[in-house]
Image (tube, rainbow, N blue to C red):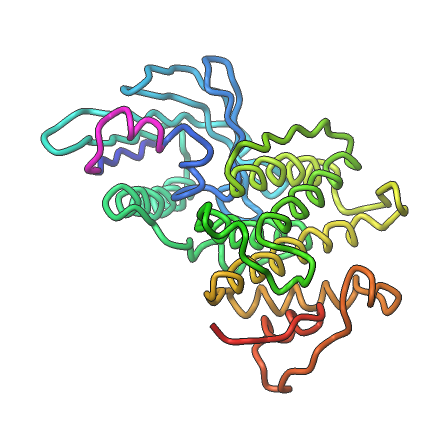
Amino acid sequence: MIIDKTVFIPVDPDTAFALITEPERLRRWQTVAARVDLRVGGEYRWTVTPGHSAAGTYTEIEPGKRVVFTWGWQGTEAPEANPSTVAITLEPVDGGTNVRLVHEGLVGEQVAAHTEGWNHFLGRLEALATTGDAGADDWAAAPDPINELISAEATLAIAQRTLASLESSDMGLQTPCEDFTVDALVEHLVGSVTSIGKALGLEMDDDASASPEVRVADAAAATLEAFNARGLEGTIDMGFAVLPANIVANILNIEFLIHAWDFASAKGQSLDVAPALSDYVLGLARNTIAPGMRGHSFAEETLVEESAESLDRLVAFTGRQVTKA
């Protein structure tokens, strides 16, 4: 069966083509993470929502006009064993571009599920192209089911949105981490994610001239893809210690969510996190931050009201003073 849907966006075809093919732009409306090798025969992998990644191969590419790729879900719980095909065609019209998406090869319940998905994401594409911001994706906010890697993808989505809002004038701002400006904290976060990627056997490259969001996103996408392929069993040699794999995944969660809070706080902004997610990460933090880490990696836990929201309790547990923007 076929899904055939067309939306209008008020941008030219070249801009539309970038929105549907470039990782930095895909993250604004469709994906949490995206790896793209944009050539015929090249492969892509998109984390569409936390815990759900699609992958395939590009079969046709006409810049500014058309892209065709196979589509299949990864993992043992994937809804289909065989890939289908997605074709996106761009037609210039007065005031912008018609984006026509045709998804072929779906069977049974796949049609309804994918129709709902494409309606959701094409609506976000329209919002991005029209207003410049599709907003945070509600589908990524509170994953269910959840584990340490799925929550890491959800917290990454929050961190990336916060990082994307940073401007050059923000880089010298002081963060709640006493020894870190925004610029220094970006370097710390990139270094932390990169070190985990290297421990997983990756060769990690960092383009220091790229934006903070791109640097973190590139490192995180590669690291989480490798981590998902490896799984949460056994241990990982981090160089300074051999740690259980789930504890290393916990570290990613803490790094993404706590530093997202740090970046937002440095700008005098609040951070919007689904309580289910912050509560889950608080549990991970309690299983990860040992008393011996206080005074080194983390300050002493600060006090908050017992009735405080889970994000505030998480922030306090990591030794930060809870303040309201």
Q: Is residue 8 visible?
A: no
- Picture coordinates of residue 203 (x, y %)? 72, 27
Q: Does 298 sit left or right of 110 as displayed?
A: right
- Picture coordinates of residue 213 (x, y %)? 52, 43
Q: Is residue 172 above or below residue 321?
A: above
Q: Does 156 sit left or right of 238 as displayed?
A: left
Quarter-of-image position of residue 237: top right
- Picture coordinates of residue 175 (x, y %)? 59, 61
Front-most of residues 216 and 66: 216
Q: Is residue 320 above or below residue 227?
A: below
Q: Residue at x 84, y 63 (%)?
A: 293
Which residues lie in the magenta part?
A: 8-19
Q: Residue at x 68, y 58 (%)?
A: 254
Front-most of residues 166 and 64: 166
Q: Residue at x 45, y 13 (%)?
A: 40
Q: Is residue 119 visible?
A: yes
Q: Is residue 264 above or below residue 252?
A: below
Q: Is residue 219 above or below residue 274?
A: above
Q: Does 10 sit left or right of 306 as displayed?
A: left
Q: Residue at x 54, y 42 (%)?
A: 212
Quarter-of-image position of residue 301: bottom right
Front-most of residues 7 and 28: 28
- Most extreme residue toward the left is 94
Quarter-of-image position of residue 6: top left
Q: Quadrant of the N terminus?
A: top left
Q: Is residue 306 magenta?
A: no
- Picture coordinates of residue 100 (x, y %)? 25, 30
Q: Is residue 14 magenta?
A: yes
